[in-house]
Amino acid sequence: MITETGRVLAVEEGYLWVATIQTSTCNSCKAQVGCGQRLMAKLGQDEALLKVGLGDYPAKAVSVNDQVVLGIAEEAVVKASMLAYMLPLLLMLLAVLAAQQWLAPNFGEPAVILSAITGLAAGALIIYWHGRSSSYQEQYQPILLDHHLAVAA
């Protein structure tokens, strides 16, 4: 289970709106230089707004400004990452191989380049469609693992 800490912004019927500070592990990560998440944090985009189901917690147990611990299954993150990174590259490679076989003899290298771009774009569109259609599936939803009451200032 991958966990992240966040702050409750709103409590509604059956779910919470949580702002997560996504730089919790940046200092321990070996990919600091090439990480897009760290770059976004430096640019001021260090919070993400998430809709989190309450699960077994009663809505009255959690209030605004409480600190919560969210979790998502590692398997879901691995599947989503593999899909996001591998599918566009695979489709680009297949499009290039097909173009070299059937288009290159007649249309030359520009047809192969255009096929590569088309394969990459097709992969991106499939990922976009999959993300929109599966965003409500339970396995991709963060769950509330724990919460701590807000400390009065």
Image (spheres, rainbow, N blue to C red):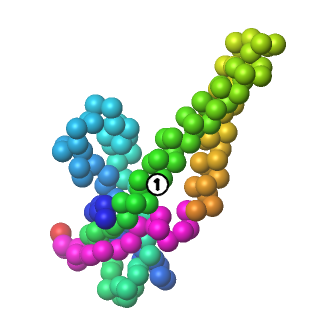
Q: Residue at 54% of width from left, 69% of height from top?
A: 137
Which x, y percent locates residue 146?
27, 75
Q: In which image quadrant can residue 91 be found? A: top right
* Disc 1 crowd, CA 10 A, few/some/many (<14, 14-19, 20+): few
**Vertical order, 47 against 96 (above or below):** below
Q: Nearer the viewer, residue 32 or 117?
A: 117
Q: In which image quadrant can residue 53 be found? A: bottom left
Q: Read off the magenta span.
A: 135-152
Q: Which amino acid does label 1 sit on?
A: Lys
Which x, y percent locates residue 76?
43, 60
Q: Residue at 28% of width from left, 69% of height from top?
A: 69
Q: Does the magenta stretch include residue 136?
A: yes
Q: Which residue lies furthest to the right in this view?
A: 106
Residue 117 can be seen in this image: no
Q: Is residue 126 magenta?
A: no
In the picture provided, is 113 more to the left or to the right than 80? right
Q: Residue at 51% of width from left, 41% of height from top?
A: 86
**Vertical order, 103 against 140 (above or below):** above
Which x, y percent locates residue 123?
62, 41
Q: Residue furthest front?
A: 101
In the picture provided, is 83 more to the left or to the right than 114? left
